[in-house]
Amino acid sequence: MADTTSAVGGGVQDVYGEDCATEDQIITPWTLSVASGYNLLRDPRYNKGMAFTHEERDAHYLRGLLPPVVISQQLQEKRLMQNLRSFEAPLHKYISLMELLDRDEKLFFKLLIDNMEELLPIVYTPTVGEACQRYGSIFRRPRGLFISLNDKGKILEVLKNWPEKSIQVIVVTDGERILGLGDLGCQGMGIPVGKLALYTALGGVRPSACLPITIDVGTNNEKLLNDEFYIGIRQRRATGKVYSDFLHEFMTAIKQNYGEKVLVQFEDFANHNAFELLEKYSPTHLVFNDDVQGTAAVVLSGLVAALKSLGGTLADHTFLFFGAGEAGTGIAELLALEMYHQAKLPVDESRKKIWFVDSKGLVVSSRMESLQAFKKPWAHDHEPVTNLIDIIKAVKPTALIGTSGQGKTFTKEVIEAMASFNKKPLIMALSNPTTQSECTAEEAYYWTEGRAIFSSGSPFNPVEYNGKVFFPGQANNAYIFPGFGLGLVMSGAIRVHKEMLLAASEALGGTVTQEDCQKGMIYPPISNIRKISAHIAANVAAKAYEIGVATRLPQPENLVKFAESCMYNPNYRNYR
Ligand SMILES: NC(=O)C1=CN([C@@H]2O[C@H](COP(=O)(O)OP(=O)(O)OC[C@H]3O[C@@H](n4cnc5c(N)ncnc54)[C@H](OP(=O)(O)O)[C@@H]3O)[C@@H](O)[C@H]2O)C=CC1
Ligand SMILES: CC(=O)C(=O)O
Ligand SMILES: [Mg+2]
């Protein structure tokens, strides 16, 4: 395969190492060839299973390598769904789907796109969490790039080993905060792989343009360090200068290898690194932190949609976040900015409507000295309170938002306290996976006698209470990042601005219908996500053009149509 985009180091786009400047360099001898015969069946990009026609079988030396019958993609899809449904354990479904991805990429994405509601909980939260926990045991074939401390000084070389050169989106983790499951080290790789599967299925970014990366700087997870099947380096996490120098080498190599327009999505870093990385690389790279910014956009959209039932403006409400980390403070920042936009309420005033609880209790000004920087703006004057029920009684929030990673913390008493002074308490249990959810949908509806507006990070089935069916929404950044990324890619954006996040949030909100609201939903059905992603992408791209960070010129006239035309299509193609 020819390297067509990244220069090997000569003058302008020296692809094959032909310039004087590369005379002394070692070159990767990429070659271009047509796959045929046995190799064609082993290439997941081009394999079509039994869908090769007789003509194709003749032309590509496949005769005899397949059973004689030709089966359409649709029938293969039906057969695979039947097989998947026969597995009881979600983890077995996960393994089977990942094997399909390794075997027949188009069929994998067709299944995912056509059966979104059923398969998302397998490829994504909650099952991907279990898969990461057991990644060492279920490991079959590597996906993506593993960059460990052993590769120090050679990260550019590692990137050059990846066969695809036209990379548009990278999702990278260092595995330190995988969902609400903590430090899973190198086994966090399941998350970039899962997120990028959604980039393609939900946002239409080509699979060949997606690159999952895990940075392995060790793990502090004793269980993994003692697990004979652990796949990462067996040492405690590197910190301080060793960590930041390594990440800097990575970020520099990314830009050197893929240029200015590759999107780097930081995912599931612990907050002590996440905020710093975002701040450090935002001015120089196209970076986006999904946990801070993607979550903010999706939750803001849900809060705005909830106003249709709750009444008033955002500034008329009081928000209590249970958990003051990346997700919580990220949401709060965007919420305060939107309050400013809506009501021209100065950001400092908006902040007073937003309260935080962390592991030590209410975040108050008397704790200022010991607070991490990202909590300081939310430390208000109040006496210290530690018990959540007492905090609810003191703050009287209209919305309670769980971003703690601690399951079952919204107890009956907590929810009842919310229901005691709110006609329609807004409860969001955002922590993932399901085991870490602050409460279940059933609990939220039952304990509020059906009055709650509820949504959660991981999916819950509809709940029947008193003869009425309630439809909990999934408040997950999956609604945002695929469309957001597509918007950046299709406009050739080189930087992310906050206004682009607001644009994404607004676009998502605009897709919630009156019918959704009547069902108590503050998010549209996930089955419509590809259409929604096209709208999000168009809004984000429009903002990129307006701000002047878009490089794909001239600006397409109809951005929604353009977004749709850029989207990956999983149907098998005909081969000559
Ligand atoms: N639905 C979605 O789209 C998303 C969901 N999430 C989920 O949100 C959760 C948190 O993620 P993130 O914000 O990145 O994690 P962080 O580690 O950055 O933040 C967690 C916060 O929860 C607080 N906390 C922990 N235990 C308690 C407790 N017992 N009582 C009160 N507060 C507590 C921590 O307190 P302290 O600061 O004192 O340690 C910290 O402030 C995860 O489960 C993650 O899966 C994240 C991103 C998107
Ligand atoms: C959804 C997500 O990004 C998280 O739970 O970390
Ligand atoms: Mg995440």
Image (cartoon, rainbow, N blue to C red):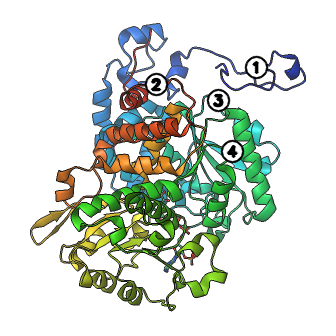
Q: Which residue does the numbered mark 4 point to in the structure image?
A: 284
Q: Residue at x 57, y 84 (%)?
A: 365
Instruction: Note whether 450 is above or below 108 in the view shown.
Output: below
Label 3: which secondary element? loop
Measure the C-alpha gap from mark 1 to mark 2.
32 Å
Q: Is mark 1 within 8 Å of ligand 3?
A: no
| CB atoms of marks 3 and 4 within 8 Å | no
Q: Residues within 10 Å of mark 4 (few under 14, many from 20)?
A: some
Q: Residues within 10 Å of mark 3 (few under 14, many from 20)?
A: few
Q: Is mark 4 within 8 Å of ligand 3?
A: no
Q: Residue at x 59, y 62 (%)?
A: 184
Q: Earlier in the sequence, mark 1 or mark 4?
A: 1
Give x and y (percent) for residue 329: 51, 67
Residue found farthest to the left: 467
Q: Which residue does the numbered mark 2 point to in the structure image?
A: 47
**Image position of 571 (left or right of 518):** right
Measure the C-alpha gap from mark 4 to mark 2.
39 Å
Label 1: which secondary element? loop
Q: Nearer the viewer, mark 3 or mark 4?
A: 4
**Residue 163, disc:** 3
Q: Earlier in the sequence, mark 4 or mark 2?
A: 2
Q: Earlier in the sequence, mark 1 or mark 2?
A: 1
Q: Nearer the viewer, mark 4 or mark 2?
A: 4
Q: Which residue does the numbered mark 1 point to in the structure image?
A: 14
Give x and y (percent) for residue 38: 53, 20
